[in-house]
């Protein structure tokens, strides 16, 4: 059993060893994980679409190209509710949202969230099939506090 004890000691030594980068004053370069949207109606885009609607940058899954502030002519498979906040500057044109578990489909000509956080997003030509009467209606949210668990760098 000396081989196992030795391996445990080496792992224990590595766990308490000082970080060499910190010792020499090297700054850690952190890159946020990419938000990847597919918009093909086959991949679940719920989290990525919500992140994009919240103002985070996103890339298209197929091409790797930046999404930009407007999405047009895409279908989104979703598994939970999405929220379009005022002030994000995001626009959806000629889109389709589909929730297969709920049998709900939302199609539209345009949903536009301007830059003014006090002005509700506007919708034109939006059709909701299978949803309840409260859907697609503006409502106020309390000011959200930043998520302390959303660190800019990986934490181990």
Image: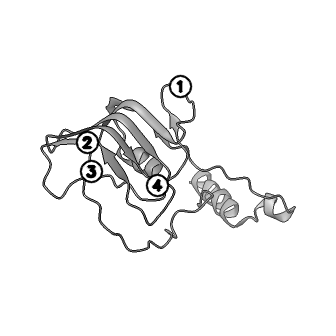
What residue did someone put label 1 on? 63
Gap between marks 2 and 4 measured at Cα: 20 Å
For the point 56% across and 54% down, the residue is 1
Task: Label 2, secondary structure: give it.
Answer: loop
For the point 68% across and 53% down, the residue is 30
Gap between marks 3 and 4 measured at Cα: 16 Å
Residue 58 position within the rendered picture, expressed as x and y whole percent measured from the top left:
53, 41
**Which callout, 3 or 4, points at the residue further toward the start of the chain?**
4
**Which callout, 4 or 1, points at the residue further toward the start of the chain?**
4
**Which callout, 1 or 3, points at the residue further toward the start of the chain?**
1
Are the two marked residues, 4 and 1, in contact with CB atoms closer than 8 angstroms? Answer: no
Are the two marked residues, 2 and 4, in contact with CB atoms closer than 8 angstroms? Answer: no
Compare residues 131 and 50 and report the one nearer the observer: 131
Gap between marks 4 and 1 measured at Cα: 22 Å
For the point 48% across and 31% down, the residue is 61
Classify residue 87 as left or right of residue 10: left
What residue did someone put label 3 on? 80
Which is more foreground, mark 3 or mark 2? 2
Which is more foreground, mark 3 or mark 4? 4
| Quarter in which the C terminus is drawn | bottom right
Q: Callout 1: 10 Å neighbours few (<14), some, many (20+)?
A: few
Task: Label 3, secondary structure: give it.
Answer: loop
What residue did someone put label 2 on? 126
Which is more foreground, mark 2 or mark 4? 2
In the displayed structure, 90 sits above or below 133; it is above
Gap between marks 1 and 3 measured at Cα: 26 Å
Task: Label 1, secondary structure: give it.
Answer: loop
Compare residues 3 and 38 and report the one nearer the observer: 38
**Which callout, 1 or 2, points at the residue further toward the start of the chain?**
1
């Amino acid at each position: 059993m000396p081989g196992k004890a030795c391996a445990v000691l080496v792992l224990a030594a590595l766990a308490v060893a000082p970080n060499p980068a910190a010792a020499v004053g090297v700054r850690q370069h952190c890159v946020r994980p990419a938000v990847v949207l597919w918009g093909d109606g086959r991949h679940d885009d719920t989290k990525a679409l919500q992140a994009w609607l919240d103002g985070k940058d996103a890339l298209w899954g197929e091409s790797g190209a930046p999404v930009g502030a407007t999405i047009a002519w895409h279908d989104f498979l979703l598994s939970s509710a999405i929220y379009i906040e005022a002030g994000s500057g995001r626009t959806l044109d000629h889109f389709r949202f589909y929730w297969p578990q709920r049998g709900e489909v939302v199609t539209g000509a345009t949903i536009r969230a301007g830059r003014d956080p006090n002005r509700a997003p506007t919708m034109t030509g939006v059709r909701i099939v299978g949803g309840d009467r409260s859907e697609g209606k503006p409502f106020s949210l309390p000011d959200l506090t930043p998520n302390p668990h959303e660190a800019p760098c990986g934490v181990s």
